[in-house]
Image (spheres, rainbow, N blue to C red):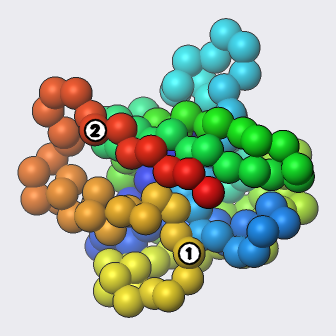
Amino acid sequence: MRAILLTPGDRVLLMRVDYGSGDWWITPGGGVEPGETPEETLRRELAEELGFTLPALGPLVWKRQVMMTLHQHRWRQSEDYFLIETPEFVPRVLNAPEAATFREFRWWSPPELRHTTERVAPAGLLRIILDYRECGPPNGPLHLEIVEN
């Protein structure tokens, strides 16, 4: 589960991480523990990674499946992206097991996302945000983005 944390001024919070293959800017979130709902997963992950209390689960706006090699193992990861509107805040890692992979947090504006040469995941994040602002939450089934690294 992933959270697209979006301010009223359309800034989105990303975390710069390095899992051994170089830096990526990603949205906060993580894996589902047994028996967790999407909301419970995001509540736990956002509290651990950002010190953020999830007010309510926003709409599901994107689905992605990633195939990657990490530490000599092949992984398939399914990600659901929920958009959560929030005022800007200062993130602070409380108890994230993967905290050693975090490099920094940053609020990005749409022009910064549009012009960056850094790796951002999902690659279509700006389009997701712009579509949401223009049309609201998606209606009907979501397209599944499939990425193979």
Extreme left residue here? 135
Q: Where is residue 81 in the image (x, y as percent from the top left)?
A: 44, 42
Q: Where is residue 128 in the image (x, y as percent from the top left)?
A: 29, 57
Asked whether the viewer can see residue 43, the reply is no
Which quadrant, please, contains the C terminus?
A: bottom right
Tell me which corner region of the image, top left, top right, bottom left or bottom right, holds residue 63.
top left
| Nearer the observer, 106 or 61 | 61
Q: Identify whether 54 is placed above or below 122.
A: above
Q: Circle 1 is placed at which residue position?
A: 119
| Residue positioned 84% across, 43% down in the render | 73
Q: Is mark 1 on a helix, strand or loop?
A: loop
Q: Position of residue 55 (x, y in %)?
A: 47, 38
Q: Which mark is residue 143?
A: 2
| Nearer the observer, 139 or 93 | 139
Which quadrant, please, contains the N terminus?
A: top right
Q: What element carries label 2?
A: loop
Q: Disc 2 marks which amino acid? A: His
Q: Where is residue 84 in the image (x, y as percent from the top left)?
A: 40, 47
Label 2: few (<14), some or many (≥20) within 10 Å? few
| Nearer the observer, 83 or 125 | 125
Asked whether the viewer can see residue 79, the reply is yes
Q: In this view, does 62 lie to the left or right of 100?
A: left
